[in-house]
Each structure stands twice: as structure tokens, then as C-alpha cells.
Image: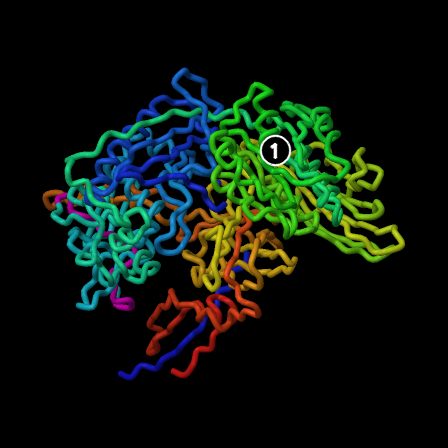
């Protein structure tokens, strides 16, 4: 029979707790600086701490032998939430926090599934974001399902630390080998077992051998590989770490290059051990051949403290240019009134050549306490720039208020150069404080980011427009893991309005938010006329907006009670005789502690890039731990010249995107025009009821073992809790979110660079072939002409 060839081209354009700053190091074969953080919503349970210690201790020995005596866990910190009672053995954290932890302990959203997993969406060999264990996993007996907890931890650590992937595939559990045999997707092929179908009615289940499907050539649907309990194979940990014989990763000799798993897809069919040995951890590291077992890990118990923040604001002479002082004050006022969490301690320092403490720490309780700080915002710019003097005064403001600088935060904003900045780097390190830096304009000190890098702080760059500053301040929220306290941006827009003209806009407020909602307008010349209308028709006019008392050209409305769900409409009229720049900002918080809001975070895959190395933009959109699909996600990247590049981010499993429909929206960024700082902002929109919540289990997780074959008898585990179908989804409201990613620095860009001549077309990673009658249907996601940008032609067959 002669088969025709039918090619169908599918171009999937699915439009739309942060670059993690782990401080784990490998010194003399021991991992130090590991942070395991417990979510504030987890009830206090001493057994949880005991089981975490036991898991890590067991994992350390397993890791030691799995890495052929190269590594073990030496020092681990367990971060206790503020919601737990204090104990004498609990120490004060330094820069450890929940949102920067390597491992988090938190309930799953919607109580769906206890599979341990790693949030990992980078390329092969790139570190993951965090490991997530649920309290149920740590407290209950899961031995038959996942194996010993220590082994599970090592499986997840390999995802997190070395950027390798699973060697099973729940979507494609079987494949046809080159020998024309049906094989379970696994590594290594030396692992033996039975292929069966399980039929369950009520409380009883029966099994039978799988039958071959004549259409696909594979086994029928619902066929499952059940491993033999007794094995001789030693690999691989990334397939079934639960098997007693499995103590190693697949090597070049044992790796199954045919298996349709994520490890082969992402790592070009290289073995997990190959990728591990290429990691920076094991360069020039010798095995510990002189000892049989590693020392036991040392644990520190740290208890989170109330948030302490000190603003350190530049008021030097250069801040008078281009209204920078005004814009800084507008953004700082918004941060103090709308972003910082109630109950926090806040102080303020201003600096030029010298520094002055404007406020020692004040506990934010109500509007009066905000005003005590905003009243001292600087009104005049003069003098030189001494960043170190500003920081030292910030430390003093904290310590004079009987608070420790350990774990306290400083928000440092400056637009100037300071050749003495390095003189206080050591003092900054010793303080234990977290320094968030905001570089304003193209002349800001080039070593500024060193401060945030060494203290685990955020780093931002804002051009001369007000929105960049507001967006940067809005991103510096609590690191405690309490989402209910976190302020969320719904709108942030700059509008250049001609004289005597109106401009209109809309902002959706979804049912997960609406508490503590503010609508703010700023202007450059004259206050505009403002109309804001709620979904049910209630109007707020200019008279309802409170104008600041410091003449910093802003007016705000706190919407009474809970903001109505639906579309809010605003209209602004420029009453001045010439055009002026207006900005609109809308912020809110979660509607209630029991309903988690939709959250968006964004980051680049690296903080620095050297031309022509491409970078990747990532945006994660989720509710709880569940991904949000079917939305528009747009990244705006701005360089020091003020030139903006807009990218639509995709969750299509091609190009820069690792897995389709996982709520991670990605895109390559190659549009390097100049050297210097670049800022990142991401706008997420769900319109026309297209957004949906995916209930699928996470990728990169320990495999739920269906059962074992023992002495010829199949012993089944309870069926895994599953959604009703493969892509179980729930529709969610229309919504809008804005978030800023940290700034990044580009170097080595030649004049008049042309990236289309430097970067190749993207790689096809999802080619599939299916029989359709007497045709073979091929489908794939089309690559771009420049990585994932544009469209590459198919060429001649």
C-alpha cells in the first residue's frame, strides 16, 4: 500500500514566590544555606519539623551515594511562620524568607493532590524555582506510593539544583522501540514489570494484561506499567526512586534515548548523569572516598518576624531634573498608603552628600501613621550623592527603634553616581539587611545592583516616567507567604492627553480581589477632571478624590468596602490649555483570606546577558498553585534610551516554553540595541470569559506508583486522585494584573546590531505523526525565523 503524506501545520499562539535568589552553596562536598519554609496557613505541628529533619537526614545519605560520594546536605534552615508560637530554640532569620526558600511546605490549592513536585520551567541544566511538599505528604505514611521521603527529596533536588527532568511520561506511558516492541517510558530499560489495565468498581479492582490497539500499535488506553518490587537495576532516580535497588541516575551507558520523556526532549537525549556532571556544582570536585557515610545535617530553626522597612531616598541635586523628585514622592506615597502591609514597621531616610533620618520606625496602623511619614517626603533637591551615608542612616533608624537590621528591608532609590559606594559593601553584608534597589534614569550608579545581589533584595530600573517607579515600588511586597496581605496592581497606565480632551478606559475587578482598592491619578501640570464608574453604575467624581497635601500632583480614591466585581470605567479630561501626561494606577488586595487571588510574577532567566546570548522572559500566572490558561500576556522591556519592546508571551510548549498549558508564559528576548540596564513589566489580561484554571497535576514530580508485582502477584495502591478528564479546567472571571520583573544588564552589544543575522530559527520539539486513514498526519508548532520570533518557511520537501 502506498501512503500519501498529509502535512498539517499547527502554529499554537496561546497568548496570555521572580528570578529566585537561592543562596545554596556546595563547599567541600557539603550543601550549605538550604532554606525550608513553612507557609503561614499551615497549622502548628511539632511533628512536621521532626519529619522534615528526618527526611533531609535520610536524603543526605542517599544523595551522597547517588552522586558517587560527591555531595551531601550539611546545613539546613527551617523557617517557622509568625503564626506559630515562639520558642527559645527559634532564632531570628537573616535574609531567609518564604518567597526565596528552596523548599516550601504548604497545602495544595483546592485540596487537590499531595504529589511532591518542583516548580521548574527553565531550559536543560537551569535551576528550578522551589520544591513543594504538602503537610499531608510529610505527616502521613506514603511509603508504598512514593517510597521513602528522603529518596523523594533527592528526586526533587535533582530538578531544583541541576535542571534535569523526569524520565517517565504520564501522557505517553508507552512507545514503540526500534526493535518494534512496546516499551514503558522509563530509564533504564532494565527495570522490569507488568503492563496491566485496572478496572475498579466501588471498593474492588481487578487487573488484566493490556491489549494492543490496532490503530496506534501501542497498548490500549488506561494501560499501566506496574514495576516488580524486586529489581536488580540501579537506575534511575528520575524514574522510580521508590524501588529499593534504585540508587543512581541514568548514565550514558544505561540511558534510554528512545523514551518520549521530558529529559530526552529538553536535554537533547543526554542522560541525567551527563547533565548533573556538567553543573557548576561538580566542576573540579573530587569524591569523598575516605569516608563511608556523610556527617548528619545541622538544622537551624528560624522564626519569621514582623516586617521592617526603611525607605532611603535620594534628594541630591540631580533629582531636580525631569521632575524626578516629584515622581519619587508620588511613588513613595503610593507605596506607603497602598502597598505596605498594615502592622509593618516603616522608617524613612533622605540623603544627598549627607543623610538625615526623617522618621525612625513607625508601626503602620491607620491613615494617621501613613501621614506621619509622607509629611517628611523631601521637597527640595540639592547636594551631591552619598549612597553609603544613606544606607548607614537607614541601619541607624532601624536599630534606634529597638529592631535588628537582620532580615529588615531597605528600599534604596537613587539617580546618581557615587564612586564611594563600594566602601560600605562589607558593612551592608554584616548588617544582615535586605537591600532592594531602584535605579532611576540612565546615570544611576552602575554598582547599585551589587547591593541587592549580595543581600537577596530586588533590583529595578525605572526610566524617567512615573509608571516605572510606581511599578517598581508595587513589586516590593511582603515575603512572608501570606498572599492575603499582598497588594496587587490592576492598572498602571500613562496617558498623554491633548488639551481639553477626554480619554476613557476600563479595568476588570474579578471576584478574587476587591479589598482595600485604590484608584490613583497623577498629573504634570493641572489636576484633570475624573469620573470613575462601578459595574452597577455608581459614580465617583473629582470631588470624591483626595488630593495630597504635599503638592505632589496626585489624587486618590479608596473605594468604600469591597469593590464590586465587574468592569470599572474611568474618564479623564485634561482641562489645561496644553497637552499633559496623566497616569492611572489601580491597586487592590485579596477579597478574603479564604479565596486566593490570581497572581502574576515575571522575571528573566538571568540578571545579565552578553551579546549575542539570548535571554528568556518568563511570566507565571496562577491561582494558588494552579495554572491559569487562555489569557493574554504581554511583556514590555525598556532600555536606558527609553525605547520599549513589546513581546506577546506564549504557553505553547515550543520555543522558549518548556511545557504547554502549565501557566508559564515564555518568549525569547534578543532585541538588544544598547548596553546598560533594561526594565521588565508584564501585563496580564483575561477578557471575554476565555480564562480557565487548570486542575492538572504539576510536572516535574515524584511519580505516583500504581502498585507492585511481588512473587507474581499484583499488589495495587489506592487509585491516584485525578481530575475528571485529561485537562480538567474551571472557568474564572475576566481579570487584569500588572507586575514588574527585576532589571537586567546587557553588555557587548556592537553598534547597529542586527539580531536576525545572529540567532537561528527555533527548534521543532513537538513533531507528532498519526495515521489518518491511508495518510500520515504530521503536526508541530512552527518555529520562528529568529528563535521564536517571526515565522520560518518550511522549505522544499
The quadrant where residue 257 appears = bottom left
- For label 1, the SS is helix
Which residue sits at x=80%, y=40%? Answer: 540
State the image coordinates of residue 101 (x, y, percent, origin top left): 42, 37
Q: Is residue 217 magenta?
A: yes
**In what quadrant of the picture does the N terminus appear?**
bottom left
Instruction: Please identify the residue farthest to the top as the structure is shown.
Output: 88
State the image coordinates of residue 185 (x, y, percent, origin top left): 25, 57
Which residues make up the magenta segment?
Answer: 214-230
Q: Which residue is mark 1?
A: 389
Res. 336 visible in picture:
yes
**In what quadrant of the picture does the C terminus appear?**
bottom left
The quadrant where residue 385 appears = top right
User: Badge 1: how crowded within 10 Å, few (<14), some, or many (20+)?
Assistant: many
Way the structure is coloured: rainbow
Quick check: 535 left or right of 82? right
What secondary structure characterizes most of the magenta part?
A: loop
Which residue sits at x=24%, y=38%? Answer: 147
Q: Is residue 143 magenta?
A: no
Amino acid at each position: 500500500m502506498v501512503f500519501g503524506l498529509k502535512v498539517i501545520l499547527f502554529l499554537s499562539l496561546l497568548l496570555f514566590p521572580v528570578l529566585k535568589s537561592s543562596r545554596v552553596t556546595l563547599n567541600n562536598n557539603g550543601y550549605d544555606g538550604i532554606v525550608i519554609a513553612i507557609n503561614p496557613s499551615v497549622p502548628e505541628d511539632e511533628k512536621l519539623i521532626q519529619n522534615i529533619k528526618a527526611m533531609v537526614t535520610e536524603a543526605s545519605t542517599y544523595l551522597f551515594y547517588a552522586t558517587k560520594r560527591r555531595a551531601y546536605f550539611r546545613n539546613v534552615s527551617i523557617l517557622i511562620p509568625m503564626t506559630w508560637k515562639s520558642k527559645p530554640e527559634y532564632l531570628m532569620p537573616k535574609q531567609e524568607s518564604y518567597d526565596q526558600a528552596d523548599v516550601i511546605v504548604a497545602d495544595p490549592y483546592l485540596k487537590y493532590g499531595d504529589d511532591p513536585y518542583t516548580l521548574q520551567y527553565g531550559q536543560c541544566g537551569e535551576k528550578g524555582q522551589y520544591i513543594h511538599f504538602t503537610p499531608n505528604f510529610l505527616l502521613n505514611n506514603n511509603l508504598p506510593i512514593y517510597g521513602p521521603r528522603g529518596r523523594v527529596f533527592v528526586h526533587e533536588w535533582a530538578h531544583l539544583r541541576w535542571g534535569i527532568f523526569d524520565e517517565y511520561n504520564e501522557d505517553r506511558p508507552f512507545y514503540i522501540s526500534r526493535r518494534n516492541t512496546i516499551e514503558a517510558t522509563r530509564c533504564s530499560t532494565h527495570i522490569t514489570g507488568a503492563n496491566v489495565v485496572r478496572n475498579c468498581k466501588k471498593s474492588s479492582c481487578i487487573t488484566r494484561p493490556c491489549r494492543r490497539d490496532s490503530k496506534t500499535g501501542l497498548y490500549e488506553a488506561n494501560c499501566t506499567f506496574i514495576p516488580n518490587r524486586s529489581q536488580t537495576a540501579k537506575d534511575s532516580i528520575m524514574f522510580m526512586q521508590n524501588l529499593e535497588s534504585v540508587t543512581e541516575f541514568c548514565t550514558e551507558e544505561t540511558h534510554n534515548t528512545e523514551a518520549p520523556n521530558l529529559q530526552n526532549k529538553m536535554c537533547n537525549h543526554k542522560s541525567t548523569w551527563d547533565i548533573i556532571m556538567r553543573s557548576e556544582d561538580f566542576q573540579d570536585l573530587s569524591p569523598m572516598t575516605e569516608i563511608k557515610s556523610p556527617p548528619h545535617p545541622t538544622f537551624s530553626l528560624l522564626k519569621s518576624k514582623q516586617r521592617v522597612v526603611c525607605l532611603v531616598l535620594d534628594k541630591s541635586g540631580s533629582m531636580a531634573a525631569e521632575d524626578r523628585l516629584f515622581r519619587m514622592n508620588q511613588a513613595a506615597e503610593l507605596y506607603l498608603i497602598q502597598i505596605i502591609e498594615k502592622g509593618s514597621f516603616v522608617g524613612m531616610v533622605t540623603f544627598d552628600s549627607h543623610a538625615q533620618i526623617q522618621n525612625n520606625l513607625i508601626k503602620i496602623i491607620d491613615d494617621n501613621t501613613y501621614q506621619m511619614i509622607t509629611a517628611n517626603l523631601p521637597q527640595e533637591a540639592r547636594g551631591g550623592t552619598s549612597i553609603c551615608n544613606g544606607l548607614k542612616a537607614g541601619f541607624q533608624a532601624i536599630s534606634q527603634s529597638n529592631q535588628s537590621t537582620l532580615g529588615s528591608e531597605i528600599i534604596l532609590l537613587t539617580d546618581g553616581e557615587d564612586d564611594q559606594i563600594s566602601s560600605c559593601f562589607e558593612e551592608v553584608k554584616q548588617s544582615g539587611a535586605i537591600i532592594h534597589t531602584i535605579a532611576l534614569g540612565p546615570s544611576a550608579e552602575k554598582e547599585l545592583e551589587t547591593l541587592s545581589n549580595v543581600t537577596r533584595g530586588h533590583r529595578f530600573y525605572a526610566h524617567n516616567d512615573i509608571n516605572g517607579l510606581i511599578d517598581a515600588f508595587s513589586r516590593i511586597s511582603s515575603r512572608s507567604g501570606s498572599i492575603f496581605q499582598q497588594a496587587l496592581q490592576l492598572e498602571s497606565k500613562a496617558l498623554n492627553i491633548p488639551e481639553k480632551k477626554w480619554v476613557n478606559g476600563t479595568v476588570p475587578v474579578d471576584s478574587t480581589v476587591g479589598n482595600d482598592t485604590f484608584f490613583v491619578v497623577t498629573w504634570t501640570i493641572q489636576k484633570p477632571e475624573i469620573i470613575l464608574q462601578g459595574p452597577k453604575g455608581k459614580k465617583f467624581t473629582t470631588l470624591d478624590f483626595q488630593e495630597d497635601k504635599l503638592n505632589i500632583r496626585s489624587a486618590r480614591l479608596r473605594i468604600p468596602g469591597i469593590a464590586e466585581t465587574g468592569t470599572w470605567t474611568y474618564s479623564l479630561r485634561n482641562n489645561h490649555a496644553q497637552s499633559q501626561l496623566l497616569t492611572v494606577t489601580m491597586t487592590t488586595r485579596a477579597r478574603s483570606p479564604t479565596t486566593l487571588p490570581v497572581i502574576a510574577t515575571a522575571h528573566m532567566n538571568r540578571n545579565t546577558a552578553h551579546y549575542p546570548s539570548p535571554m528568556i522572559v518568563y511570566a507565571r500566572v496562577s491561582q494558588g498553585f494552579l495554572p491559569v490558561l487562555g489569557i493574554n500576556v504581554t511583556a514590555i522591556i525598556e532600555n536606558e534610551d527609553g525605547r520599549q519592546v513589546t513581546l506577546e508571551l506564549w504557553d505553547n510548549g515550543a520555543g522558549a516554553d518548556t511545557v504547554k498549558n502549565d501557566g508559564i508564559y515564555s518568549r525569547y528576548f534578543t532585541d538588544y540595541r544598547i548596553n546598560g540596564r533594561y526594565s521588565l513589566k508584564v501585563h496580564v489580561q483575561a477578557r471575554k470569559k476565555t480564562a480557565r484554571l487548570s486542575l492538572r497535576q504539576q510536572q516535574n514530580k515524584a511519580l505516583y506508583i500504581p502498585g507492585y508485582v511481588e512473587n507474581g502477584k499484583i499488589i495495587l495502591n489506592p487509585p491516584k486522585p485525578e481530575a475528571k478528564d485529561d485537562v480538567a479546567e474551571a472557568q474564572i472571571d475576566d481579570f487584569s494584573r500588572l507586575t514588574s520583573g527585576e532589571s537586567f544588564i546587557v553588555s557587548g552589544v556592537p553598534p547597529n546590531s542586527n539580531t536576525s543575522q545572529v540567532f537561528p530559527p527555533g527548534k521543532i520539539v513537538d513533531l507528532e505523526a498519526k495515521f489518518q486513514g491511508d495518510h500520515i498526519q504530521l503536526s508541530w508548532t512552527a518555529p520562528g525565523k529568529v528563535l521564536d520570533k517571526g515565522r520560518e518557511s518550511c522549505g522544499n520537501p
